[in-house]
Amino acid sequence: LHRVDRRQRQMCIRDRIDGGLSALEVARRYNISSASMYRWLDEFGDEIISNFELNQANKPMSSTPKNESNQENNSSRIEELEEELRLEKLKREAYQQMIKIAEERFKISIKKKFGTKQSNK
């Protein structure tokens, strides 16, 4: 394992986000710990995801001929929604890892325990 600069960290996160690789696969590829990968996702992930979404939004919409079938439009929309879903899953995974690390580091319980009674304060 070796020290990685900010630009390399961002490349790792981009591989995770854009490349569809798991955090473990990225960690192995760049010879870093998976804990570092999750920490970087927490640190840089929102920024990179926002930049990715901004780049997607700024792409010019291609003009479609009137005779293009609805099926092609639907296919395109499905791809967009799948990408949005993938990004949301990535965010969820990053938040879950952040909670796990915080619980371990600070020895506190953050996750709600289902079935427990609320205290009357």
Image (tube, rainbow, N blue to C red):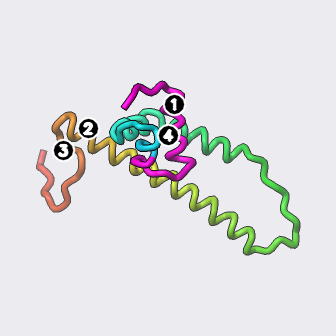
Chief secondary structure of the magenta portion:
helix
Q: Distance between the residues labelled 2 and 3?
A: 9 Å
Q: Residue 48, image x and y in percent?
A: 54, 38
- Compared across the picture, whether 90 is left or right of 72 comes to left
Q: Considering the image in quadrants, where does the C terminus appear? A: top left
Residue that carries the numbered disc 4 in the rendered image: 13
Q: Which mark is residue 109?
A: 3
- Compared across the picture, whether 83 is left or right of 59 comes to left
Which residue corresponds to the image point at 19% horizontal and 34% vertical from the top-left? 106
From this view, report whether residue 112 is shown above or below residue 28. below
Residue that carries the numbered disc 1 in the rendered image: 8
From this view, report whether residue 61 is shown above or below residue 82. above
Q: Do the residues labelled 2 and 3 touch (CB within 8 Å)?
A: no
* Dot 1 alpha-carbon crowd within 10 angstroms: few under 14, some 14 to 19, many 20 or more: few
| For marks 2 and 1 on the same chain, the one whose residue lies earlier in the sequence | 1
Identify the amino acid type marked 3: Ser
Q: Residue 8, image x and y in percent?
A: 51, 31
